[in-house]
Amino acid sequence: MPRQLSTTLRSHLEGTQFILIQMVDIETASGTNYFTDCFFDVDYDSNTYQAQGTFLGITSAEESNEVIVGKTNISLSALETANITTYATSTIINKAVTIRLAFLNPVDYSIIGDPVITFKGKIQSYAVQDAKKTSTIVLEIASTFANFEKTNGRRTNLGSLQREHPQDFSFEFTDQTVADIPWGRP
């Protein structure tokens, strides 16, 4: 997916010192939670991204020029009861997740330019993984087209797409397309 980087960020990338952080927005039944892998809380867009704590990590998501379903996993600590009641429940399925990368100024630790969205999707499933001394919740996040092949009410037309993405006009002329669109199939 092509990304437009701000002039400020492009200038910073020409330098030699980088502090890269990830920022995650996870929608829940009671609102949106914000996490970062930074070593301190980060403020961005009127939200405070909580440092470390219960947020453990993100697996890398692969990008491709093929039409595929992108997936990634987010790990959270399951030792905290609040995480179990928030994330290890069926109400978390289909909630939105946004993952951003940001560069910090090495002098004052402020965000340089705008963070870059690297993945946007919905929670497809969750699992609780127990070990001897720890426990984690793994959320599987998939891109928008993860359930596209299901036939339960989804149609390849503008109205069906705009129920979830009101500003997306990608299917505006699908009624004029004759060929089959092989979504995610080889």
Image: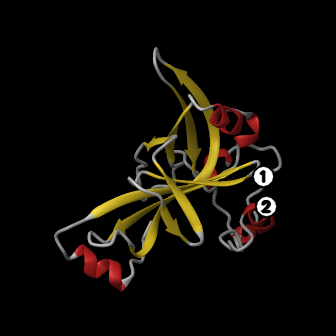
Q: Position of residue 85 (x, y in %)?
A: 71, 34
Residue at position x 42%, y 72% in the image: 3
Q: Residue furthest left?
A: 16
Q: Position of residue 93 (x, y in %)?
A: 70, 41
What residue sits right under mark 2 in the picture? 160
28, 127: nearer the viewer = 28
Q: CA distance from mark 2 to mark 1?
A: 6 Å
Check disc 1 and give the amino acid type: Arg
Q: Residues within 10 Å of mark 1 (few under 14, many from 20)?
A: few
Q: Residues within 10 Å of mark 2 (few under 14, many from 20)?
A: some
- Residue 151 in which image quadrant: top right
Label 2 vs 1, first from the N-terminus: 1
Indicate whether 175 appears above or below 40: below
Check disc 2 and give the amino acid type: Ser
Residue at position x 68%, y 67% in the image: 177
* Element class at badge 2: helix
* Element class at badge 1: loop
Indicate whether 168 appears above or below 122: below
C-beta proximity under 8 Å, tags 2 and 1: yes
The answer to whether 156 appears left or right of 109 in the picture is right
103, 38: nearer the viewer = 38
Image quadrant holding the N terminus, namely: bottom left
